[in-house]
Amino acid sequence: LQKELDGKTEPDKDKCETARKEAEDAQKEYQNLDGGRKKEIERLGEKYGRLTNEDGGLEESLQKTEEDCLFAKSLRGDSGTGLQRYVLGIMFSSVVRAANHMLEKVHGGRYSLRTNTGEKEKGKRKEGLDILVHDIYSEENEGRPAGSLSGGEKFLVSLALAIGMSSVAQKSGIRIEALFIDEGFGTLDDDSVEDAMDILNSVQKANGLVGIISHVELLMKNIPCKLKVKKTDKGSAIEKTIG
């Protein structure tokens, strides 16, 4: 043993004790850090589980919201025809059909109307709320814009549309007891006046009273019941009642 211990120095107990304490302190610090990390891992795991469960609900809510947005855009007509315009288009088509029935009595059925679904205005489609006029004497088979009609032709078409709207309204349950037309006949030739009178006579037989405000002499001769109004400096008054 003496030989084995030759040249060796006895360990410093104080240094060893200090090293042992430092090691123990380091071990405790590591254990504390390890415990904190485990708790954090557990907390994050629980949070991940909650978020995973909530994500299923959020995904469902997001899908429902996207569907609602698409439906709202469809109603508004962002990518096509909106609901309001679609319904108006159907109603307007009914008005046009009724107007065409009236126009059959004008100029031998020369004119007929059709809804225009192809024309664009300022980058937007009118979607059936505009009309084209088909003229059997014209080579334009697709019809021409209503703005190309002459004054008298416009009046007859407008009259037919007004009566068509009245007819559609009454079929919907609205009662219209009288129809009044203020001027417009001055733009018509004698044949057109007679055509217009044929239309109005048919309306009178079907719906009742038709009143016309006009200075056209031909109308005065053909309408049996008239009120003649005289203007004075004190105002207007009925001068004569005929019929």
Image (cartoon, rainbow, N blue to C red):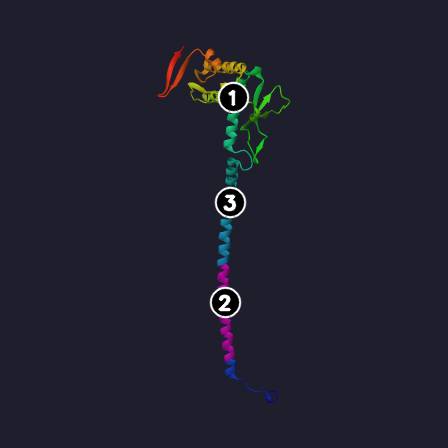
**Residue 170, horizontal then vertical, whole percent:** 45, 20
View extreme (left): residue: 234
Other-residue count near label 1 (Cα within 10 Å), few / some / many at <14 / 14–19 / ≥20: many
Q: Which mark is residue 62?
A: 3
Q: Which mark is residue 131?
A: none
View extreme (front): residue: 233
Asked if labels 1 and 3 touch by Cβ distance under 8 angstroms, the answer is no
Q: What residue sits 50% from the left and 28% below the top?
A: 88
The magenta segment is 18-42
Q: Is residue 134 left or right of residue 76?
A: right
> Residue flagged by tag 2: what amino acid is it?
Leu
Q: CA distance from mark 2 to mark 3?
A: 41 Å
Say which label, 2 or 3, has the lower sequence index: 2
Q: Quadrant of the C terminus?
A: top left
Q: What residue sits 48% from the left and 64% below the top?
A: 36
Q: Which mark is residue 33?
A: 2
Q: Give 118 or 174, whichever is nearer the viewer.
A: 118
Say which label, 1 or 2, has the lower sequence index: 2
* Mark 2 vs mark 3: in front: 3
Q: Which mark is residue 155?
A: 1
**Residue 59, horizontal then vertical, whole percent:** 52, 46
**Residue 91, horizontal then vertical, whole percent:** 50, 26
> Residue flagged by tag 3: what amino acid is it?
Leu
* Mark 3 vs mark 1: in front: 1
Q: CA distance from mark 3 to mark 1?
A: 55 Å
Other-residue count near label 3 (Cα within 10 Å), few / some / many at <14 / 14–19 / ≥20: few
Element carrying mark 3: helix
Element carrying mark 2: helix
Q: Give 177 or 61, whichever is nearer the viewer.
A: 177
